[in-house]
Image: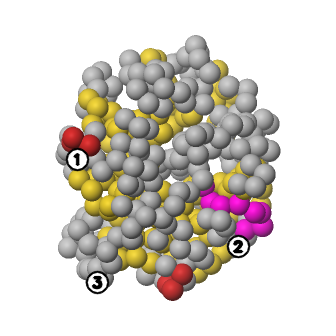
Amino acid sequence: MRYLGIFCLILFASLATSSRPGQSKQTPKQQPQQQSNGGIKIYAASDDGVSISKDNGKTWTIKTTGNGLARNRTTWIFGYKNKLYAGHEPKGLSVSADGGDTWKTKSYNVEGFVQKIGASKNKIYLLTENHVNSYADVLVSENEGDNWKQAKLPKGLIPGVVMGNQIHFTSDKIYCLPESQKVAISQDGGEKWVFKNITAGQRISYLWPIGNKIYIHDGNDNKPLYVSPDNGQSWIDTKLIPQGYVTSVVESGKGDVYVASFEKGVYVSNDNGKTWKLKTKSNGLGSVQIENLIVSGNNKVFATSRFDGGGLSMSDDKGETWKDIIKDTNVYAAFVM
């Protein structure tokens, strides 16, 4: 279910299962365009295009190739500096400068679908993957997607399959997990790298940087989740041993941590990891096969899925209860603003 290969990985949340998109299910019912009533704007990447809600997920509009998207099947959505970036499968990149109403196609010079889009130090990064030869590329643009070139990465990263949770882009750093099993960190766009030893006592497959913290996981079932509170200087066992393998880790508020465990649901801690509660379908999740978590403010959390019916679930009480806001369609990623 997971790709094999040489490992490396913005926050945003991330794909940690096979990044091959699934089959489309039922299209969410399209509603008339709504004006914002004080609610947040939610953008969801799905088989059907880019779904947009301006009223906390109550109603949606769907943008497709008819609105300028390069493809309908959208595998990632990301916002940066008043622009939205949508990646597609089997290949394609679209950019919107008007909040998603209209889109323009941008080209990149490699084959493969867009697995992830991020930004760091005023540059846009594109993680692509070619299904045919299992080859991944990390591209960088210094002019908002007009032109692309190969990003500078540490040895042991490319060529090979790079999964979305092995390379992350934050506002001022790039984090990677190369074959050496050391966390590689760059603060200058990849020109220089600092390597941090991992002393967690197990092989690490995925990482998630959040502020000065770095969470790491083995990538297999029933393995503990570790965290570094000091950007890789030391490592602590969180005492959470997820029943499934971890696909996403996010934080919000003071001490609220959310961990997506594929096939099990979302583990929630409201005391900075001291205690954990597992949330499943009985708590309102539309699917327990969660791939990406996204936080908004101190209370809202979103969970994407393209399995077990697929969809987008939302919690507005710090993960205690959940509800479906998109049902019966594959949702690969989401962005909230």
Foreground mark, 3 or 1, reads 1
Q: Position of residue 59 (x, y in %)?
A: 26, 72
Q: Earlier in the sequence, mark 3 or mark 1?
A: 3
- Cα distance in 3D space between marks 1 and 2: 40 Å
Q: Are marks 3 and 1 in contact (CB under 8 Å)?
A: no
Looking at the picture, which amino acid does disc 1 mark?
Answer: Gly
Residue 266 place in picture, x, y as percent: 34, 38
Query: Which residue is rendered at x = 48% and y = 31% of the image?
Result: 245
Mark 3 highlights which residue? 32
Q: Secondary structure at mark 1?
A: loop
Q: In what quadrant of the picture does the N terminus appear?
A: top right
Q: Is residue 72 above or below residue 135?
A: below
| Total labels drawn | 3
Q: Is residue 274 shown in magenta?
A: no
Q: Earlier in the sequence, mark 2 or mark 3?
A: 3
Say the numbered circle drawn on residue 147.
none
Q: Which quarter of the picture shows residue 202? A: top right
Q: In the displayed structure, does residue 60 sit left or right of residue 162? A: left
> What residue do we see at 75% from left, 55% from top?
132
Crowd band around label 2 with a 10 angstrom C-alpha radius: few (<14), some (14–19), many (20+): some
Give the alpha-carbon distance from disc 2 to disc 3, as whole Å. Answer: 31 Å
In the picture, which quadrant includes the C terminus? bottom left
Which residues fall within the magenta stretch?
A: 108-115
Does residue 212 show up? Answer: no
With respect to residue 160, does 225 lie above or below? Answer: above
Judged from the image, the secondary structure of the residue bearing numbered disc 3 is: loop
Residue 281 horizontal side relative to residue 64, left or right:
left
Q: State the residue position of label 2.
A: 107
Distance CA(mark 3)–CA(mark 1) = 26 Å
Residue 23 on image: x %, y %: 51, 61
Q: Which residue is mark 1?
A: 284
Upstream in the sequence, badge 1 or badge 2? 2
